[in-house]
């Protein structure tokens, strides 16, 4: 199997990808749900980091530093940086932001590698629903130094229209900031994996396709 199918199976086995009837924060009724909070062990984080590294390598994303927005992004950037070193001999830095600027000790807003002008930075996140995290961290990074944000990597692209736009959050990120968002997998990959028997869930295929037809973006 490709690493995409491996990742989809990993999500299902970890209880991160589940099927049923779910009411999302947007109010939409969805037949599937992705809860990245169910990654709970060191072994799972180590494996997850490998998938981020695979995505970065496959897409040829230039990276000198991985940035993980607090708080969820902190372990994600850390495990992705370790996996890049272990799997691909790519020794990159990583950092994360504080919610509030520290005014004692070493001080500052960032922990780890401090942003530097021209540095190629990749933002590491779990999922992207509204793009709120990017809106918050983009000015933080740019105010600290004129870094070169070469991309953002997420686990799953739902390929879903925002409530107030015909664009998805991924597409809006490029429209607003010129930042390409790469996902380890997207909803079409998950549908295909079910159809091919990689994971269970065939009884939800029709509902997933209907949901996709109603709320999905065409790309």
Image: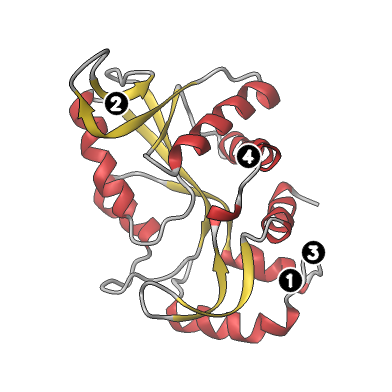
Near-viewer residue (151 or 140): 140
Observer able to see residue 124: no
> Under tag 1, what secondary structure?
helix
Spatial CA distance of label 3 from label 2 is 40 Å
Residue underneath mark 2 = 147
Sequence order check, earlier mark of 2 and 1: 2
- Residue behind mark 3: 198
Q: Residue 194 carries which label?
A: 1
Element type where label 2 sits in the image:
loop
Q: Which of marks 3 and 2 is nearer the N terminus?
A: 2
* Place of residue 194 in the rendered image (x, y in percent of width and height, measured from the top left): 73, 71
Report the Cα–Cα distance between label 4 and label 1: 24 Å
Which label belongs to residue 45?
4
Q: Is residue 19 left or right of residue 26?
A: right
First in sequence: mark 4 vs mark 1:
4
- Residue 200 vertical position relative to residue 140 in the rendered view, above or below: below
- Hey, which quadrant is residue 115 in on the image? top left
Q: Nearer the viewer, residue 61 or 20?
A: 20
Write the residue at 25% across / 51% down. Answer: 176
């Amino acid at each position: 199997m490709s690493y995409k199918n491996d990742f989809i199976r990993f999500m299902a086995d970890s209880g991160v990808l589940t099927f049923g009837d779910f009411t999302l924060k947007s109010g939409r009724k969805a037949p599937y749900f992705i809860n990245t909070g169910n990654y709970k062990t060191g072994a799972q984080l180590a494996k997850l980091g490998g998938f981020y590294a695979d995505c970065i390598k496959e897409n040829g994303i230039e990276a000198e530093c991985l940035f993980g927005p607090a708080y969820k992004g902190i372990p994600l950037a850390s495990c992705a940086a370790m996996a890049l070193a272990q799997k691909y001999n790519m020794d990159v830095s990583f950092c994360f932001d504080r919610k509030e600027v520290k005014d004692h000790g070493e001080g500052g807003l960032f922990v780890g590698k401090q942003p530097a002008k021209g540095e190629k930075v990749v933002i590491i996140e779990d999922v992207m629903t509204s793009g709120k995290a990017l809106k918050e961290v983009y000015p933080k990074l740019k105010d600290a130094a004129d870094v070169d944000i070469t991309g953002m990597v997420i686990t799953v692209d739902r390929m879903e229209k925002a409530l107030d736009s015909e664009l998805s959050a991924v597409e809006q990120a490029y429209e607003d900031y010129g930042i390409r968002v790469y996902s380890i997998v997207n909803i079409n990959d998950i549908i295909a994996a079910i159809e091919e028997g990689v994971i269970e869930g065939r009884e939800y295929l029709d509902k997933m396709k209907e949901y996709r037809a109603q709320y999905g973006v065409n790309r």
